[in-house]
Amino acid sequence: MAAQTDGIHLSTTKKKKRLLIHEGFSYTKDKDELQDTTYWRCERRGECKGRCKTVRDDVFKTVPHCHPPDATRVTVEKAKEELRTRAATTIEPTIAVLRAATNDMSADCLSSLPKASSLKKSIQRERLAAGNQ
Ligand SMILES: [Zn+2]
């Protein structure tokens, strides 16, 4: 899995909040959707005022960021998402889920991931939550 900084990617945070990943920036949902428009805020609240909105699949940046995009963060977030999806939808052993999600990661990205033991725990938690055991 290569680091990607373009395109639109929807994910969810641990707390099931929706996360938008676009051009290396991560956003959390700001306001409720209004028809087809959703408003997003840079996840670095407090330090960055970056905002964007999405209209269906199109992203419009409305307020620029005060920091560079973070490809590592994006890759890590996507791996975590894959991990959660696999945990919930496959019967692969925990270690296989972990390997599949982190397979092509660079050392940089791997070092930004939580410890393997806590990733394994989150796979098991996800399975329980999904009733997939
Ligand atoms: Zn920002």
Image (cartoon, rainbow, N blue to C red):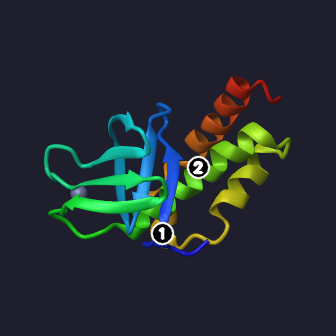
Q: Quadrant of the C terminus?
A: top right
Q: Residue 81: give its label.
A: 2
Please, what is the three-letter code of the amino acid marked with disc 2?
Glu
- The quarter of the picture where residue 32 lies is top left
Q: Residues within 10 Å of mark 2 (few under 14, many from 20)?
A: some
Q: CA distance from mark 2 to mark 1?
A: 16 Å
Name the residue rendered at 72%, 28% in the picture: 130
Discs 2, 1 touching: Cβ within 8 Å: no
The picture places residue 41, in percent across and down from the top left corner, at 27, 47
Q: Is residue 112 toward the left or the right of residue 60 in the image? A: right
How far across and down, in percent of the image, does residue 54 sit? 39, 53
Q: Quadrant of ligand 1?
A: bottom left
* Vertical position of residue 64 compared to residue 115: above or below: below
Q: Amino acid at mark 1?
A: Gly
Instruction: Identify which residue, 83 or 18, lies in the foreground.
Output: 18
How many marks the image carries: the answer is 2
Of mark 2 and mark 1, the one earlier in the sequence is 1
Residue at (78% x, 53% y) in the render: 96
- Closer to us: 59 or 64: 59
Which mark is drawn over residue 7? 1
Foreground residue among 62 and 28: 62
Question: Which class describes the residues within 10 Å of circle 1: few (<14), some (14-19), or many (20+)?
Answer: few
- In this orientation, which residue lies closer to the viewer: 131 or 39? 39
Residue 64: give its label: none
Q: Secondary structure at mark 2?
A: helix
Percent coordinates x, y for residue 36 in the rendering: 44, 45
Image side of residue 94 versus residue 123, left or right = right
Disc 1, SS = loop
**Residue 38: x and y, percent?**
37, 44
